[in-house]
Image (cartoon, rainbow, N blue to C red):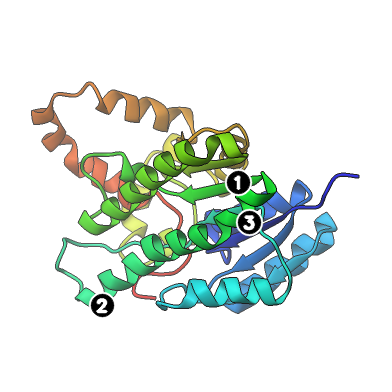
């Protein structure tokens, strides 16, 4: 009998996080879902449990708190749960230039998108290594690869997700643990209904967009296959490859287009300033 495995997905109330939870449930994983918004988590849990026949547990948690990751892991320990798959999907975007928001907002971004996933990985990795099996997905973004991204801090934290994933993947590859940075481009989520983004996203061609389930399906396949970095979608792969061959002076002229793409590129588990 195959051992039942359990996944933890952050930022699971909507977007790519919710899509990863659904794909994992469809593949027979029990799923722990967390975000700061409890109501959508409960709706998702009820639907997935009914449709997929797996155990879906809701663990509301705002990862913006400095001790949130520790409390979340303590709750897992208290329930006697071991995590075999970790999907770090929580995050949010900020419009405008660096300095246009107050520092506490940037501090919150660093906590949610750098510190929390790093802490969760650090706390859950030893168990994965001991069992000889683990899968870690860090939802990054095309913004982490493009030289002119969606704002200084946002692009930087997504670049961290890529670099962290690549380094850790090398470190643990021979011990049964796979780590992948999934770097989606334009992905349709509720985040794009936010004021200030509607006009931007409506101007982008339909062929540039992907849906969250497609991103999650291919992203999960990528981590199972042991790919350290994965770009969902042929268009995104061609776009990123082309950037490597564009002369630097031309990149400045492309900055506006890159900002449009990267600003709306990743999935967010919370609204800006949320």
Q: Looking at the image, is mark 3 or mark 2 earlier in the sequence?
A: 2
Are there few (<14), some (14-19), or many (20+) residues within 10 Å of tag 1? many
Q: Mark 2 points at which residue?
A: 104
Disc sitting over residue 127 in the figure: 3
Residue 133, image quadrant:
top right
Task: Mark 3 and mark 2 in contact? Answer it, CB < 8 Å.
Answer: no
Along the line of sight, the residue nearer the viewer: 120 or 271: 120
Q: Closer to us: mark 1 or mark 2?
A: 1
Q: Is mark 3 on a helix, strand or loop?
A: helix
Residue pushed farthest left?
A: 249
Residue 99 visible at all = yes
* Residue that numbered label 1 is attached to: 135
Quarter occupied by the C terminus: bottom left
Q: Distance between the residues labelled 3 and 2?
A: 34 Å
Q: In this view, does 255 lie to the left or right of 172?
A: left
Name which of mark 1 and mark 2 comes first in the sequence.
2
The residue closer to the viewer here, 38 or 112, is 112
User: Which quadrant, please, contains the N terminus?
Assistant: top right
Residue found at x 53% / y 63%: 123
In this rendering, does residue 61 appear at all? no
- The residue closer to the viewer here, 252 or 91, is 91
The spot of residue 130 in percent (x, y) is 65, 51
- SS class, disc 2: helix
Q: Is residue 247 left or right of residue 16?
A: left
Please state the horizontal and vertical placement of residue 6, each as a whole percent of the image: 72, 57
Q: For the point 38% across and 49% down, which residue is it?
A: 161
Residue at 33% x, 30% y: name it.
240
Q: How crowded is mark 2: few (under 14 residues within 10 Å), some or many (20 or more)?
A: few
Going from N to C along the chain, the mark reached first, 3 or 1, is 3
Query: At which x and y percent is residue 229?
Result: 45, 36
The image shows residue 98, relative to residue 236, as above or below, that is: below
């Amino acid at each position: 009998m195959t051992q039942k495995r359990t996944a933890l997905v952050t930022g699971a109330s909507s977007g790519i996080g919710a899509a990863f939870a659904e794909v994992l449930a469809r593949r027979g994983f029990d799923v722990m879902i967390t975000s700061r918004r409890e109501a959508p988590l409960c709706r998702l849990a009820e639907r997935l449990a009914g449709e997929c026949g797996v155990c879906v547990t809701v663990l509301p948690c705002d990862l913006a708190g400095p001790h949130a990751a520790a409390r979340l892991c303590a709750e897992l320990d208290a329930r006697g749960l071991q995590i075999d798959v970790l999907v770090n999907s929580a995050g949010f975007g900020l419009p405008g230039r660096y300095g246009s928001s107050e520092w506490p907002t940037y501090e919150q971004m660093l906590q949610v998108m750098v510190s929390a996933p790093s802490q969760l990985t650090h706390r859950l990795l030893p168990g994965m290594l001991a069992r000889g099996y683990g899968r870690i997905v860090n939802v990054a973004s095309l913004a982490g690869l493009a030289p002119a991204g969606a704002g200084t801090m946002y692009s930087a934290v997504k670049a961290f997700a890529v670099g962290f994933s690549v380094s850790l993947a090398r470190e643990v590859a021979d011990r049964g643990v796979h780590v992948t940075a999934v770097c989606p481009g334009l992905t349709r989520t509720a985040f794009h209904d936010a004021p200030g983004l509607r006009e931007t996203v409506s101007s982008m061609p339909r062929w540039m967009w992907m849906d969250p389930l497609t991103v999650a399906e291919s992203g999960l396949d990528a981590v199972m296959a042991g790919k350290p970095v994965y770009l969902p979608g042929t268009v995104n792969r061609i776009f990123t490859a082309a950037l490597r061959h564009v002369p630097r002076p031309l990149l400045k002229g492309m900055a506006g287009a890159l900002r449009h793409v990267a600003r709306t590129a990743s999935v967010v588990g919370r609204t800006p300033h949320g």
